[in-house]
Image (cartoon, helix red, strand yellow):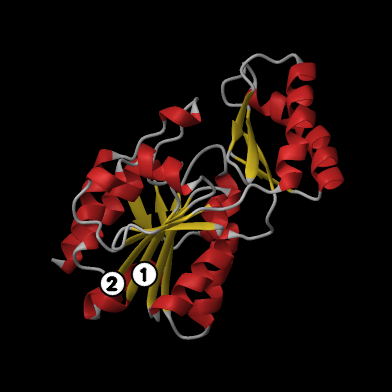
Amino acid sequence: MTWNAVTDHARSFFSAAAADPSRVLLALDFDGTLAPIVDDPEDSRMHDGAAQALARLGGVLGHVAIITGRGVAVVRRLGRLAEREGLGNLVVLGQYGAERWDAATGEETPPSVPENVSAARPAVEQIIAGCAIDGVVLEDKGRALGVHTRRSADPDAAFRLLEPQLAVVAERHGLVLEPGRNVLELRASALTKGDALRALVDETGASVVAMCGDDLGDLPAFEVLRELRDGGLSTCAVISGSAEQPAMAAQADVLAEGPDGVAAWLRDLAAALA
């Protein structure tokens, strides 16, 4: 098995979901959860097993959502969402909820590009050029700038060197600096995945809620899960574990072995609802 139930909440989640699938909200991060982490963000692709399981679940569960720091258009393209069957009820909340796409209607709410992000880009480019480290990559997300160190010879050392310099730029331009797995993101909005998840719960009226994630940006969503649980909802935190963020395991009701484990958990959930 590539996933383990860590708490009783994990063990009871399948039965709670089976009792009324229409009241279930399944929310998932993209990179590191539905898609393996890769050196180049543009090479990211959804795990085949996860995609197949989601197609099965999409026809059964009331609500399925991807909550990501990426832009909606990027996730739709990398996940090949337009080509996949069974995802007619999928909602994608991009850039922490600043933009949205509904598969059912095809409607997309694009975000504006904040002036402070555009203004910060030259300084970020200058820092990257000045650090003289090969393999550091800038990803322009529109409402955010992602500085990736994964392709450098020593990603951790590059991360430590760049973080304080980027923090200065973020403060100067009124941006939020958020660290992740070999990435430092400067973004315009203080929106979190927790805000996005709570908004979906309020919108859908879901009473059974799972969130799958792998990185520090997912922590606010897991905090919301705990609050929902305290309010009487059945919730499950699925952690896509990695050596890069071992502290995330403390959040887990289900601890999965990376995207392979998440795909296995999704398959088992689909089987439990069949």
111, above or below 222, in the image: above
Q: Position of residue 4 (x, y in %)?
A: 36, 55
Q: Position of residue 130 (x, y in %)?
A: 80, 18
Tell me how far mark 2 sits from mark 1, CA to CA. 7 Å
Lower sequence index among marks 2 and 1:
1
Q: Position of residue 149 (x, y in %)?
A: 63, 27
SS for callout 2: loop
Q: Position of residue 162 (x, y in %)?
A: 76, 30
Residue, disc 1: 25
The answer, for residue 2, to whether it is visible in the render is no
163, above or below 252, in the image: above
236, above or below 213, in the image: below
The residue that appears at 51% across and 45% down in the rendered structure is 70
Given the image, on which type of amino acid does mark 1 rest? Answer: Leu
Given the image, on which type of amino acid does mark 2 rest? Answer: Gly
Which residue reaches farthest bottom? 232
The residue that appears at 20% across and 67% down in the rendered structure is 60
Residue, disc 2: 62
Q: Around disc 2, counting alpha carbons within 10 Å, would you say few (fewer than 14), some (14 to 19), or many (20 or more)?
A: some
SS for callout 1: strand
Q: Are marks 2 and 1 in contact (CB under 8 Å)?
A: yes
Q: Quadrant of residue 250?
A: bottom right
